Amino acid sequence: MTLELGHFALIVALLVCCVQAVLALVGAQRAHAGMMATARPASWAQFGCLVLAWCCLTWAFVQSDFSSLLVAQHSSSQTPLIYRITGVWGNHEGSLLLWSLSLSGWTVAVALFSRRLPQAFTARVLGVLGAINAGFLAFLLFTSNPFLRLLPPALEGHDLNPLLQDPGMIIHPPLLYMGYVGFSVAFAFALAALLAGRFDAAWARWSRPWTLVAWLFLTAGIAVGSGWAYYELGWGGWWFWDPVENASFMPWLLGTALLHSLAVTEKRGAFRSWTVLLAIGAFSLSLLGTFLVRSGVVTSVHAFASDPSRGLFILGLLVAVIGVSLTVFALRAGSLGGGGRFALLSRDTSLLINNVLLAVATSAVLLGTLYPLFIDALGMGKLSVGPPYFEAVFVPLIAPVMVLMVIGPFVRWKSDTARRLLRTLWLVVLGALVLAGVLAACMGMDNVSPAAFGGLLLAAWIASASAQLLWQRLRAPGRIAAGWWGMWLAHFGLAVFILGVTVVKSGGQDLDMRMRVGQQAELAGYTFVLLDEKPYRGPNYTAFTARIAVYLDDQRQHLLAELVPEKRIYHARQMPMTEAAIDIGILRDVYVSLGERLEDGEWVVSLHYRPLISWLWAGCALMGLGALVAVLDRRYRRQRSPSPQTGAAA
Amino acid sequence: MNPRKKRLLLIACAVALLAGALALVLAAFRDNIVFFHTPTEVAEGRAPQGRTFRIGGMVEAGSVRRDADGVTVYFAITDMAHKVPVRYQRALPDLFKEGKGAVVQGKLGEDGVFLASEVLAKHDENYMPPEAQHALDAARTLQE
Amino acid sequence: MKKISPRAFLPLAIFLVLVVFLAIGLRLNPRELPSTLIDQPAPDFLLPQLGQPNQTFSPRAMRGQEWLLNVWGSWCVACGQEHPTLVAFARQQVLPIVGLNYKDGHEAATDWLKRLGDPYQLTAVDADGRIGIDYGVYGAPETFLIDREGIIRHKYIGPLTPELIEQDLLPRLQQLRAPAAP
């Protein structure tokens, strides 16, 4: 019965969403208060239905109900409880349900926190969100129903893909989806403003916290996903420029541009159509990302088996959502009006340049991601675009952004003088050069290639400017707003991140070798000794573990750590899995994983040395923290009741 | 500076930026694109020498051999019509199996042995790499 | 109403071009459906035969005729229910049935066929279940209807019943055979 109940709840949710979209949008257009008033209760109703559907599905997984097709395919009676619960979203149908549920969650959040916004505006936002969720629920019900029965029931399930049986994979998809879907709020705000034909600073101020939260989730989601790839795939890589990764990175880039553009629109009223376009773009790329991942139209290392008929449905959804919004944009952009004027040298200009560069970099990533598809579609052969392309294109496009991003906060809005700016900046330049020199010396001059030095210089530049900015701000009078701290933390986090990337890319070392018990190997000054191996049984797999001692010297005097990597064979799918063992340090990770077992006591062992890789995650954490601090800024909480001209008129 | 001049300057900057970006993209495409070839194409000499490309197909059953160092692996990639000998010097991914689909990336040596720099892993044992599927399909069409 | 600028349509135009490519891309890459395998070539294998371990069987040997691949194991309760139906159906000689003995012991399997009757033209032995994985088997019994080109046309999960054979399998078979007839 549980499955039927869940199925029913899903159908009700679809109907509620349709009603919500139609009543709210039509009501807002006709200024009909009664119709608009349905939007809030409808949001709660669809959220309730989706939570119910979610619980039903989770229950089926927990109970190992193999009369459910989804459970039989993605779980088994031996799967540990935690992975039976997370198995709910470790598959196509369940992850779409998660998409829909989180969209519903965002809708309810908007309904809850928009009491001070004009009714017509709120109704439009909720109407747009309802329409999007109606599309996704239809997709779920018609092509990817998670509540299908399997009759007669399977005797045993097929188990969850072992790669997904991992703590990182428990939280990665929900975080990522919260981020993807979160941009729908900024999108709905933009569309509501387009429909109403009114834009002003208040609109930007309402959008900002939502965009920040979505960006925060997306940042965390990407970082966790990258961390998962790092320790779970067993070869110490953390970013592959793979289509699936790019799918999450592109909305992040455009979302970053949107955050900054919203700041200008709020402060100065400028860049309105640009901001709206970015809001549409960020969510469009989120949808495109879902399409790429779910339809399998691009080849990906991360690709799980996919289904083209579903792809067609998402493509339809993509056309409906993006096509309609871009058409509305085209029709209404003329009425947005220009912003305030600003001089060539001003914070406005620096933000505009950065925005444009971010958008261009996003396009370059998009082009590289879709290029194989274009060529294939034109019948010109099959090819792939790998990391070298992305590095060659992305780095030169993003480097100026990094140089400019820390100059921006020093420059005044509207107009500034070069003289004033140079007085501040010479100190920053000096600091950056000294810091870069020190960093290079720490790495050992011989190991630093020109490219690596460029990376160090960028990190040093941002760090030095951040220090100077902090010093200036602390000396200046007045309370420092949380928003400022958020900006500072995020920018500084990027410096930490770049330093991590540069050092790990130029100083990482790898060695694959055959090792028998007792044999020793050396890498990056560490000595590795294979101590022993032993078989053991896990809940749904059998495994070998090997103990590998890591010494700081070749005399085996100073033991650093004893690492225990595993090789597992999961029963249900007979699928082998490598579980790497990592000694995590502030300055470096030592990473060991097992390849094939050649004979008794003899293995192919992969050894990796990863300097400063933790800084990479720390940088992401700082950026996320920055967003969090900025969201808590007081001015978003005392959103004063806006002037009637903002939304009510339509 | 008057508004008209400023506008012109901004447009000129934007055009220069776009042109620069485009040049960058094109250059990167020229140097870094990895083409895909089937074992049959390699056997017929239609694959480039000295340039990185990909081969997809099945790992021929019984073809996997190891050097004494344990790390160097030899195997053959086949589309059931032709096969290409491959050498690879790193730990193999978990889902590499004889008789299963695989995609390798690397360069063709002068002795006709393909020196793989990467053996692409899959995430799902049910999932056949599309390039490998393509090679098998292409070879089958030729035979019929 | 304010003027509509043609420039504002640029994003829409770019997006539409993108959609065209995405749509073509979708048609280009028809991927297999691992959950069903319907209308896909039956995965190839080479397995020893039950009772004659030095003889092997491959689905290629069945090219040119429709046939059933029935996945069973002596440990499987539902297979016991299904078995009499299969034996009766085999007597009608409508099409050959090949057994795939899935994750089973040799003794147990031979004994079972001796006791309950052998409906199979032959039985291939998939002792460790690797072929079962290729076929997406998640529990015996499962039966695959494979056409003369070696394409899987349908998959029956769970025991076949006389009704199922009558109302589903035979019509499907007729459909498969119809276009081949002159």
Image (cartoon, coloured by chain):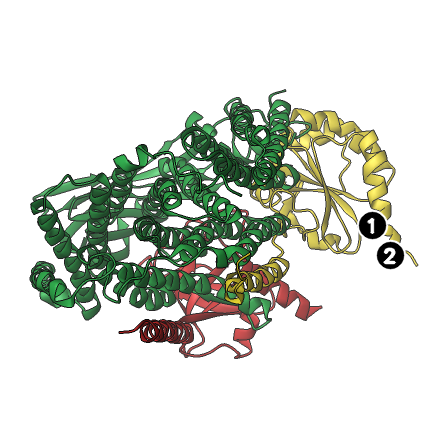
Chain colours: A green, B red, C yellow
Identify the residue at the far top of this view.
Answer: A1
- The residue that appears at 12% across and 67% down in the rendered structure is A419
Q: Quadrant of residue A559?
A: top left
Q: Is residue A572 visible?
A: no
Q: Could you tell whether B117 is left or right of C119 in the image?
A: left
Q: Are marks 2 and 1 in contact (CB under 8 Å)?
A: yes
Residue A516's spot in the image, x, y percent? 26, 49
Left or right: A557, with C93 as reference point: left
Above or below: residue A138 compared with residue A455 = above
In percent of width and height, residue A55 lies at: 52, 24
Q: Secondary structure at mark 1?
A: helix
**Residue A560, placed above or below residue C74:** below
SS state under label 2? helix
Residue A203 visible: yes
The answer to whether residue A121 is left or right of residue C85 is left
Residue that mark 1 sits on: C176
Q: Are discs 2 and 1 both within one chain?
A: yes
Q: Quadrant of the C terminus of chain C?
A: bottom right
| Dot label at residue A640 | none
**Residue A6 left/right relative to A532:** right
The amino acid on which the numbered mark 2 sits, given as a three-letter code, is Ala
Classify residue C173 by image quadrant.
Answer: top right
- The residue carrying pointer 1 sits among few (fewer than 14), some (14 to 19) or many (20 or more) residues within 10 Å by Cα, namely some
In the picture, the disc for residue C180 is 2
Amino acid type indicated by mark 1: Leu
In percent of width and height, residue A641 lies at 38, 34
Chain letter for mark 2, please: C
Instruction: Choose between C46 and A15: the one closer to the eye.
Output: A15
